Amino acid sequence: MKNNFRQLALIMCIAFICSFGLSLSALAQEETSATVTGQVTDSTGAAISNATIVVTNTATGQARTIQSNEEGNYTVFPLIPGTYTISVEQSGFK
């Protein structure tokens, strides 16, 4: 009986350590990517569709180019966490 209790305690400890390790692994993975989300609007607040958005990592110079949707929204994912510059262009706008 005492031996069974020790085996059960050992199994529970191993299960706890494994689940704790998996939790730490999941947390570490969450920090490996970033997302930039926004909306392109004019001075009146109206959405600008099909605007060209360029998101550039200032440390690496790596750039991603996307278009805003019909509501002016855009999302860039996945990105390496860091500092970025964002430029937006659309004909007829400065």
Image: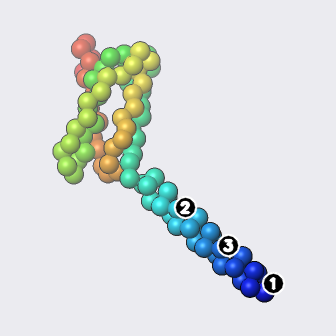
How are the residues colored? rainbow
Under circle 1, the secondary element is loop
Q: Provide residue 22's location: percent of width, then percent of height.
A: 52, 62
Location of mark 3 (residue):
12
> Quick check: 48 above or below 6?
above
Front residue (pair 67, 47): 67
Q: Which residue is mark 1?
A: 1
Among the 4 quarters of the image, the one containing residue 93: top left
Query: Considering only order in the chain, which callout, 3 or 2, is on the residue closer to the N terminus?
Result: 3
For residue 62, which numbered disc appears in the image?
A: none
In the picture of the structure, the residue carrying the numbered disc 2 is 23
Q: Residue at x 39, y 32 (%)?
A: 75
Query: Within 10 Å of the Cα at label 1, are there few (<14), some (14-19), or many (20+) other Cα atoms?
Result: few
Instruction: Note whether 1 is above or below 34 in the view shown.
Output: below
In the drawing, does residue 20 fall left or right of residue 58?
Answer: right
Mark 3: few/some/many CA within 10 Å (<14, 14-19, 20+): few
Position above or below: 77 against 16: above
Does residue 44 appear in this view? no
Q: Helix, strand or loop at disc 2?
A: helix
- Amino acid type of disc 3? Met
Q: Quadrant of residue 15?
A: bottom right
Amino acid marked by disc 1 = Met
Which residue occupies 41% across, 15% down? 70
In 3D space, how far apart are the residues under numbered discs 1 and 3 (Cα atoms)? Answer: 17 Å
Secondary structure category for the residue under label 3: helix
The residues tagged by marks 2 and 3 sit, at their Cα atoms, a distance apart of 16 Å
Q: Residue furthest top?
A: 92
